Image (cartoon, coloured by chain):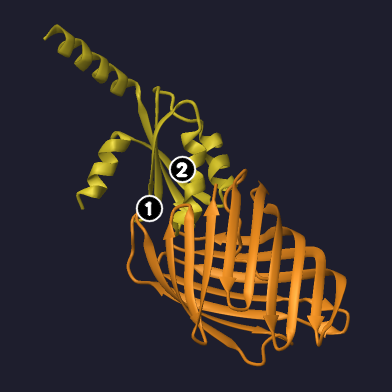
Amino acid sequence: MKKLIVIGVLCFSANSHALTQKIEVLGMVCAFCAQGIEKSFESVKNVKAVFVNLEDYFVAIESNDENGIDENFIRTVITESGYDVKKIEVVSESVSEIKRKYESK
Amino acid sequence: MLYAAPMSFKGSITTMATASKDHVSLESSYVITAKNAIGISAHTIKGNGYKLRAGNIFHLRRLMRKNAVSSQTNLWLFTNIGKINIKKNFKDKDHSYLSPTLQFDYETKRLFSLFSHQILRVGHENFDTTKIEGGFSFYETGYNETQPWFILKAKNTNSLFKKIEYTPTLRLINKAIFMDAGITDGDPSLHLMYTF
C-alpha cells in the first residue's frame, strides 16, 4: 500500500512539473512531410512526448519540466522542417490527454 | 529523370526507386539546409528506338514555399549534372549534361497538383520532359494512418515517346513511406520513396 502511495505521489509530482505547448503550424498538410517535426522534437533531451495532429494542424510538445521548450527553438525546428508557426500557447492538458481526446472522436 | 521533390527535413536522407517497362531509376538525397538538398541518381530509359543510361549528381533548391493554414504551395529548381549514354540504331555515345527542372506544386490534405518542365538537351537530341499531375485523397486520415490517393499523371518526353503518357496512379502515404503504383498503356509502374 505504501509503495502504491509513493508511486502515486511520484507520478503526480512528475506530471505537475511537466508543461505542454501547443503549436499551430501553417502548411502541415501531409504526414510524409510532417514527420520531420516529430523526429526533430523527439530527439530533444527535455521533450517527454510529441503529438502531431493533421486534423487541426497543430503539434503538441510535452516537456519534462515547467520551463517548456524555448519558443525560438520551436520556431527554428518548425521552419527547418519547411513550415511556419502561426501560434504557440501553453495548454493545461498533457500530450496523452490530447491524444485520447482525438482518438475518441 | 524527374523527381517528386524529395526534400524532407534538415538532416534527413530520402531514397527512392522507380521501376516500369521503360524506366528504372534509383536515387538518394540529403537535406543540407531547410531549402537545399543534394543527391545522386542513376537512370535507364528506353523508347522510340533510344536507350539512355544516365548517372548524375543533383542539387534541389526550394525557391518558394507558401504555407497557408490548410495548403502548401511550392516552387522547386532541380539542377542535374552528369554523364549520359545514348544508344540508337546500334550507335552509342557518351555525353556530359546539365539539366535544370522547374517544378510547381500545390497540395492540401485532400488535393494534389503538380506541373514540371525539365530541359535535357544532349548534342542534337532534345529529351525535354513536361509533367502534369493532379489528384485527390479518398478520405482524410490521421497522422499515423495510411492515406490513399488517386493521381492522374500525364507526361511527355521529346524524342523518347511519340505521344503523351497517361498514368492513373494509386498513391499510399504513411509517414516515412510514399508509394505510387500506376498503369501506363497497360504496363505497371512502381515508385517507392522512404525518408530516414
Q: Chain of mark 1?
A: B
List the single residue furthest toward the bottom: B162
Question: Chain B hue?
Answer: orange
Amino acid found under the numbered disc labelled 1: Tyr
Q: Which residue is mark 1?
A: B143
Percent position of residue B178, x then y: 48, 60
Q: Is residue A76 left or right of residue A25?
A: right
List the single residue furthest toward the left: A1
Residue B159: quadrant of the picture:
bottom right
Q: Which residue is mark 2?
A: A38
- Which quadrant of the rendered structure holds the N terminus of chain B? bottom right
Percent position of residue B48, x then y: 70, 89
List the single residue furthest toward the top: A2
Indicate the secondary structure of the residue bearing disc 1. loop
Q: Chain of mark 2?
A: A
* Dot 2 crowding, Cα within 10 Å, few <14, some 14–19, many 20+: some
Question: Relative to A92, does residue B181 appear above or below in the rendering?
Answer: below
Question: Which chain comes out yellow in the rendered image?
Answer: A
Give the distance between the C-alpha atoms of the residues marked 2 and 1, in whole angstroms: 10 Å
Percent position of residue B55, x then y: 76, 63
Residue drawn at x 23%, y 45% is A101
Question: Relative to A84, does residue B128 appear above or below in the rendering?
Answer: below
